[in-house]
Image (tube, helix red, strand yellow):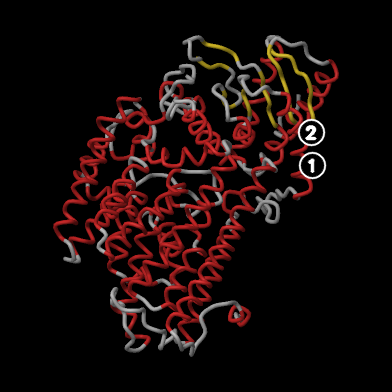
Amino acid sequence: MSFSWLTRLPWPREGESGNPAVLITAAQRRVLTIALIFFSLTLLLLCQRYFSFTASYVSFDQGIFNQVFWNGLRGDFFQSSLSSTLSTPVVHDGEVPRVAYHRLGQHFTPALLLWLPLYAIAPGPIVLMILQVTLTTSAGLVLYALARHYLAPNLSVWLTASYYCANAVIGPTVANFHDLCQIPLFMFGLLLALEKQWWWAFGLLSVLTLLVREDTGIALFGVGAYLILSRRYPQLGLAVCSLSFLYVLSLTNVIMPFFSEDISRRFMIERFGQYVEGSEATTVEIVWAIVRRPWRMAIELLTPFGRKVEYLLGQWLPLALVPAIAPAAWIIAGFPLLAIFLQRGQSPLSLNIRYAIVVVPGLWYGAILWWAQVGAGWLGKWPGRPDPDQPAQPETHPLPRRLRQFWITCLVLALGFTIASNPNRALSFIIPDSINPWVYISPVRQWQHAQAIRPFLAEIPPTASVSATTHIVPHLSSRREIVRFPDLRLRNDQGKVIFMDYVIADLWQLQQYQVAFKDDRQKLEAMIPAIDQMLTSQDYGLRAIRDGVLFCQRDAPSDPQALADWTTLRQELLAGLGNPP
């Protein structure tokens, strides 16, 4: 296979020399070009999926975060009725979701308040997409500055390009908005502050890293462990480790339970329930159970062996496998990797979900240190670390041809695997969602279906309560009262249980995907009887059906033609499920 076409891109070329200032400008231009391409493509993919209503299962979190920000503008910080539908009282105890539910009991994310003024400029899910892409892209620019502290421009550009090509970066970026998108920027920033000895910035970014989420202290703990084991700043490292450890334990055992019981009754059991007995456990109990049974921990770390090796290779591939032999990468990234590998289930081992991006800063920083300390010998005796008080040195020893070709091959493979995985269905308009059985919806058909949904959305007043299927939720989430269909009830601010004013349910999309995806099939099977009961009770009137999308209003008469359309559609759905009426 020939990769000669890649050499025609604006990569650093062999033999570049001359004025150092000109060389730095050229390298920075290349980094900015790559960053702009990344920003444009990922934002385009997010917008295409959002406006075509094809985000599917990742849409719900987008709705949750948008509602959290929307409520925050009104002083109801971190409250979400959508998040309440996932809470322990609702899931396990059968209670009705609450509009005043504080999401801090599920995930402690005060760092999101930083971006509330930006959200206030143009409230809505779109600004959150722009924010996520901007944070991830900006992190790459900080990474370049971090690499330049140790390395010459040529190699720094390669390391930055590998960041933008990584599956663990692209996948989470084209997912729904998530709190962990802040991690690369904060951690690359604190590592740069460490190298420049900007201690105020290091302290500030360390605190911000902790405030991203309750479990991001694990990533910061890795930085502290590196400072201790490398003997660079052992006292600072000890302080960072102590702060991270005590923060995570006190937060998950004292502060978060103040808001709800979700951390002990739901999240710890769902992720680490294999280590304990019973239906609830605190983080202290989980840690103690793991320590008491090291053999169980070893089994969890190594199994399934093939899947975990595949995960590591996927993380290392954009960096030409360098992190596999970089001690600093193992130390810093090892702790978030440990947290991922000890969880049960297959989803934590996906490079396309948010957990993967937490591992990225440690791997790239470790690769930078390896190139500065070991890899420099491969390139000749050029300065590994420029003197901060002197101008940066020109590139006199570019990458050897074979190494450059190998790295290009790794980048092409990384991009190829990312595209083939169709991260978060962001590429469903060009890639089938399933090969066997075949599931593919053309972009023309996607947009035709979207046009069937939009008129219904326009009929729902902005202050009305609503129940909607998953991929429609983000478009309606800028309101106080919203749940996911088939839920219909909600406890409002007056403590009264109310029924939603409107219901909009898209069964067409579930109908397309249910042949290949079990979750979609189960949702469709649950929605059909729920709609039957809703219409039979006459609490809701079926106003219209358009392209498999049902639009209902409470205390309104049903349209006779719509009821006839539902009878026909219902028969089609049951036949597709193998349950003829």
Q: Amino acid at mark 2?
A: Asp
Question: Marks 2 and 1, Cα distance to the nearest angstrom?
Answer: 9 Å
Q: Quadrant of residue 128?
A: top right
Say above or below: 492 vs 242.
Answer: above
Q: Position of residue 530 (x, y in %)?
A: 64, 20
Expressed as whole percent of the image width and height from the top left, the position of residue 428 reads 67, 51
240 left or right of 108? left
The numbered dot on residue 448 is: 1
Q: Which residue is mark 2?
A: 547
> For numbered disc 1, what is the local secondary structure?
helix
Residue occupying image coordinates x 61% and y 58%: 40
- 374 relative position to 86: left or right: left
Q: Is residue 555 above or below residue 33?
A: above
Q: Is residue 285 above or below residue 355?
A: above
Classed neighbour count for the residue bearing mark 1: other residues with Cα under 10 Å, few (<14), some (14–19), many (≥20): few
For marks 2 and 1 on the same chain, the one whose residue lies earlier in the sequence: 1
Q: Residues within 10 Å of mark 2 (few under 14, many from 20)?
A: some
Question: Which of 93 and 376 lies nearest the eye of the viewer?
Answer: 376
- Residue shown at the point (62%, 40%) measured from the top left: 56
